[in-house]
Amino acid sequence: MPYYIGDVIKDEKRMIARTPEQFAKTGVDVQLNTRVEFIDGDKGGVRLANNKTLPYDVLVLATGSEAFLPDIPGVDRDGVFKLKNLTDATRIKSYLAAKRCTKAVVVGAGFIAMEMSEALTQRGIKTQIVYRGERPVRNWSAEFSKMVLEELSAHDVDFITHEKPIAVERSSGSFPLRLITDNLALDADIILFALGVKPNTTLARDMGLAIGSSGAIQVNFSQQTSRKNVYAVGDCCEVFHRVGRSWVNIPLGDIANKQGRVAGAVIGGHAMSFPGIVGAQSFKIFELDVGITGLTEDEAMKYGFHPVSETISGTPIARSLSAGEKLKIKLIADRYTGKLLGAQAAGNGGAVSRINILSACLWNGMDIDEIGYMDLAYSPYYGGAWDPIQIAAQALGRKL
């Protein structure tokens, strides 16, 4: 959606995977803008806001997640937005055009905040990011957050730390809005809150389904909930983390797609299970690609591992062809088993492809010695004879 707002994607229809009319051709009745008020799990009925009840034999909950909005005065003012769905995106894009915005404030420092800062900047809008913490994408190690900060600065995006929003007011100056924080008053044409999401479990809780420690709906490997004929998929439910060996909630579209396919197959009578995830994630901020997979060092310790890490800096292609491209990779392994536990990468080329390779390594439980000598395709345009992954693995191996 940030790419639609930034006008990289110009037609909103390209954001729609399938229309209700296309669903209808396959026998699926899609009822948009229809609110579910209550689910009677004992009688098998879904009560809608219009008091109509839809009976069911099997139910799939795909209620997604909700965007956080701070409980402060003024968040309902015109020009204050969150970004969770296509409706939000079209409203933001229309507002930017209608108001001819020149200045924006983004509150938050996660993926959406980073991608929206790029989208707004590319539209010629001066952008300031406000964050109550110290650095962006705080789950990454400090050296990778520093690379993100440098990329923001290079594109004239201000990153303001240790400021908590208190209120949104009408500005007394030439801008319509003013964000009040602990110590600042920031004027803007538009204010976007990008403070993360939480699983939407209201209906699940009301019908008595088990909720996991992550705050999302508990499911098994077939996406079945604590009620035998009720399934859950996507942002609203948990997923098994293959490295941490625990059930977590990671709200990402690719995970939701896979869970939905598994649930559909199981309901249709096929034996199928969703084997879990390793936590692979990535985003782009201007010319910087950033990716992470597996566990961070803090997470590894929480799960009882003994993490050791190594960070190397190199180039995504052979040095003889490099024009200054940079690539930084961090690997984390268990001191006693040598098993890879996690990886992070950032650079202006090749970072996400390396994270995908390392995700496959995590998926298959590979250790550092195996990774250091695994067979990878070599071409000077795509990497050196020794890939940065192998260089990092061998350097880490010397610490074990």
Image (tube, helix red, strand yellow):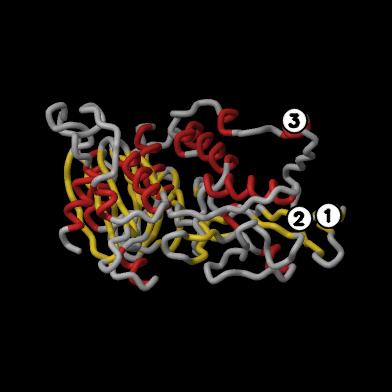
> Are dots 2 and 1 in contact, CB under 8 Å?
yes
Front residue of 220/113: it is: 220
Mark nearest the camera among 3 and 1 is 1
Q: How many C-alpha atoms fall within 10 Å of the one at disc 1: few (<14), some, or many (≥20)?
A: some
Instruction: Label 2, secondary structure: give it.
Output: strand
Side of 346 relative to 171 (left or right): left
Q: Amino acid at mark 1?
A: Tyr
Mark nearest the camera among 3 and 2 is 2
Q: How many C-alpha atoms fall within 10 Å of the one at disc 3: few (<14), some, or many (≥20)?
A: few
Separation (CA) of disc 2 from disc 1: 6 Å
Residue placed under numbered mark 3 in the picture = 21
- Which mark, by number, is residue 394? none
Q: Amino acid at mark 3?
A: Glu
Front residue of 141/10: it is: 141
Horizontal and vertical percent position of residue 250:
49, 56
Q: Is residue 361 visible?
A: yes
Residue placed under numbered mark 2 in the picture = 59
Horizontal and vertical percent position of residue 391:
19, 46
Q: Which one is earlier in the sequence, the residue at label 3 or at label 2?
A: 3
Q: Residue 228's quadrant in the figure?
A: bottom right
Q: Give above or below for 155 relative to 247.
A: above
Residue placed under numbered mark 1 in the picture = 56
Instruction: Label 3, secondary structure: give it.
Output: helix
Instruction: Label 1, secondary structure: give it.
Output: loop
